[in-house]
Image (cartoon, rainbow, N blue to C red):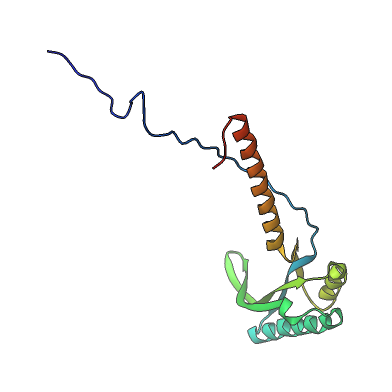
Amino acid sequence: TGTLIGAPGCDAESEQEVQRKIITSGNGLVRVSPNMAELNMQIEALNRDGGAAKVDVDQRVNRFLAALQPLEIDETDVVASSLKLNPNYTYQNQKRQFTGYRASRNITLSLHRLDQLNELMDVALKSGIDQIGHIELRVADEQQYQQQAQQQAIADSQQKAVALAKAYGATLG
């Protein structure tokens, strides 16, 4: 008796052509200077009467919006929708003591003319904005530049694939 050992799929000669693959990646970079800014600001008021705290915040928001008119900033570029009103406490000798209500409103403003940035911050602080928390310099039409970088990356990847195929004596298919 004998033992037969086999390995399926390991034929020395195959009728199927081996598919070769070249996988490449590419890089694309587009440098663009920022042409706009997004500012996050906040107004706060503390008052024993919650209604009075809210009125104080609302009045300062309205003063700020009026102060923006000479800068010709479109109202759609200003979002001041969130209002918070919370009780405020201090703690003395492990006892909580009510001090009033804290009203706060966050304002987000998109500025399309960077040459107005310093003037805008001055106007904000003079009209009653308590905090200018975050200024992000951005590009207005970012998607356009992302597409350009993507096209550069595709072209770079294709050039690499052509060079590798040539080095291996192959063609791209």
| Residue 87, x across and y down, in percent | 60, 76
Q: Which residue occupies 68% across, 82% down?
A: 53
In the image, 31 versus 168, the foreground residue is 168
Residue 98 location, quadrant: bottom right
**In the picture shown, does residue 54 fall above or below 121?**
below
| Res 45 visible | no
| Residue 150, x across and y down, in percent | 66, 53
* 143 relative position to 120: left or right: left
Q: Which residue occupies 65% across, 85% down?
A: 49
Q: Which residue occupies 69% across, 77% down?
A: 79
| Res 24 visible | yes
**In the picture shown, does residue 157 fall above or below 71?**
above
Residue 59 location, quadrant: bottom right
Farthest residue, direction left: 1
Q: Which residue occupies 66% across, 82% down?
A: 48
Farthest residue, direction top: 1
In the image, 132 versus 113, the foreground residue is 113
